[in-house]
Amino acid sequence: MSGLGDKLKGSAKEAAGNITGNDKLKLEGKKDQVVGDIKDKAEDAKEAASERIDGTRDDDRDEITPQP
């Protein structure tokens, strides 16, 4: 499940827990939201690292290409 999916699921669980007075369900919802946040941050870091690596590769190619 995606980070957004976990956050939405968690929000729904937390709301249901609030309505029913079920503390366990509220905590599960909060946990799911934290898991969603972590997944989003991990995906952002992965994308940033990939962009950085791609940029470094492009820079290396420029240095290797002989100049006339």
Image (spheres, grey):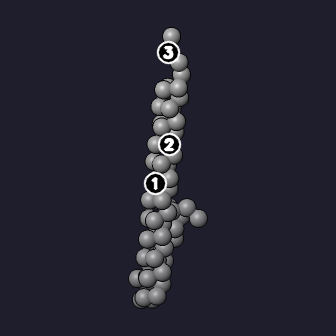
Badge 3 element: loop
Amino acid bearing label 3 = Gln
Q: Is residue 38 above or below residue 13?
A: above
Q: Nearer the viewer, residue 19 or 5?
A: 5
**Which quadrant of the view contains residue 65?**
top right
Say if mark 3 contacts mark 2, CB within 8 Å: no
* The N terminus - image quarter: bottom right
Mark 3: few, some, or many residues within 10 Å (few <14, many ≥20)? few
Image coords of residue 64 (percent x, y): 53, 26
Q: Earlier in the sequence, mark 3 or mark 2?
A: 2
Residue that badge 3 annotates: 67
In the rendered view, tell whether residue 33 sits above or below residue 19.
above
At x 44% / y 59%, what residue is drawn?
Answer: 41
Q: Residue at x 51, y 10 (%)?
A: 68
The first of marks 2 and 1 along the sequence is: 1
Q: Position of residue 33 (x, y in %)?
A: 45, 70
Q: Which residue is mark 2?
A: 53
Q: Amino acid at mark 1?
A: Ala
Q: Residue at x 44, y 65 (%)?
A: 37
Amino acid at the residue labelled 2: Ile
Tell me the tag on residue 61.
Answer: none
Q: Residues within 10 Å of mark 2 (few under 14, many from 20)?
A: few
Q: Are marks 2 and 1 in contact (CB under 8 Å)?
A: no
- Identify the disc placed on residue 45: 1
Camera-nearest label, 3 or 2: 3
